[in-house]
Image: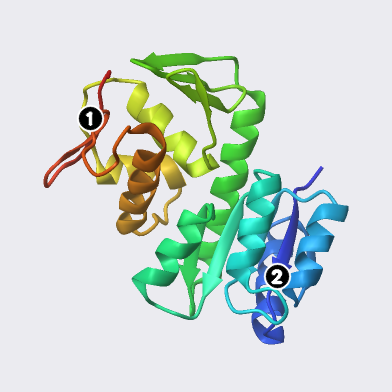
Amino acid sequence: MSSRILIVEDEPAISEAVAYALRAAGYEVDEVDDGNIAVSTARDRRYDLMVLDLLLPGVPGLDVCRVLRAESDLPIVMLTARDTELDRIGGLELGADDYMTKPFSMAELVSRVRALLRRRELDRTGRRVLQEVGGLHLDVTRHAATIDGRPLHLTRSEFRLVTLLASDPGRVFTRDELVRHLWQSEFVGDRRAIDVHISNLRRKVEPDHRHPRRLLTVRGIGYRLVAF
């Protein structure tokens, strides 16, 4: 059965072009053009992924992302006409899995969508794997994490990054390695998005995110996870 995708975009030309590209790639697609309708539609029907515009009538895209992320782990690709770091960080901090800045390549969008859906399917079907680094415990199959005995609420992208880092504690992973692991696509995401995800992770796994002791930066190279 093909995956179902909800497009939330109020510009008809863009919505139609995205829908055409995704249908041509074999996906079932629905389209809505309003934030309020997007939230209610996503709640009423089962979708595998959402393509979400930032600027919408009714409820803005950032608010749609915030509401849905509090209720589910639905993968979200955010679209924005604004090429500012603040908008990108805002979407990622609220739990968007990826973002693309208009204008964008339809081939790249389809590739990003395919990578996110493939990651979700692997998360669902993989054998149970447990990882432990100090007080950090990861149940890879169940997509569950705890830190010092308390539950951690991680986005899908945050979870994939921390499980890679935990697979070889102490090893330095370069930003390029993290990018390739996260997107698993010939089109890689913005490397700065990795820094945002790492910053978000530190707020969740560190006693004081301003002075990290678990998730460490190796300047000019990347990041490593150590027991603490």
Tell me if label 1 and label 2 are in contact, CB under 8 Å: no
Indicate the quadrant where residue 174 lies: top left
- Depth check: give the residue in front, 173 or 147: 147
Q: Which circle's residue, 1 or 2, is located before the other in the chain?
A: 2
Q: Quadrant of the N terminus?
A: top right
Q: Position of residue 182 (x, y in %)?
A: 43, 43
Q: Residue furthest front?
A: 208
Give residue 131's position: percent from left, percent from top: 44, 16
Q: Which residue is mark 1?
A: 213
Between the C-alphas of marks 1 and 2, the distance is 40 Å
Q: Which residue shows up at 30% across the image and 51% down it? A: 195
Residue 25 x %, y %: 68, 58
Q: Is residue 213 left or right of residue 136?
A: left
Task: Give amino acid for label 2.
Answer: Val
- In percent of the image, x 33 and y 15: which residue is there? 134
- Check disc 1 and report its element: helix, strand or loop: loop
Q: Which residue is outermost to the right?
A: 44
- Asked if residue 74 shows in the view, the reply is no
Q: Which residue position holds label 2? A: 8
Q: Position of residue 59 (x, y in %)?
A: 69, 73
Q: Quadrant of the C terminus?
A: top left
Q: What colour scheme does the image use?
A: rainbow
Q: Residue furthest left?
A: 219
Q: Quadrant of residue 120?
A: top right
Q: Disc 1 vs disc 2: which is toward the camera? A: 1
How would you rate the neighbour count of disc 2 (Cα within 10 Å): few for under 14, some for 14-19, many for 20 or more?
A: many
The disc at residue 131 is none
> Going by the image, does 228 lie left or right of 119?
left
Considering only vertical position in the picture, is 197 above or below 226?
Answer: below
- Above or below residue 153? Residue 16 is below
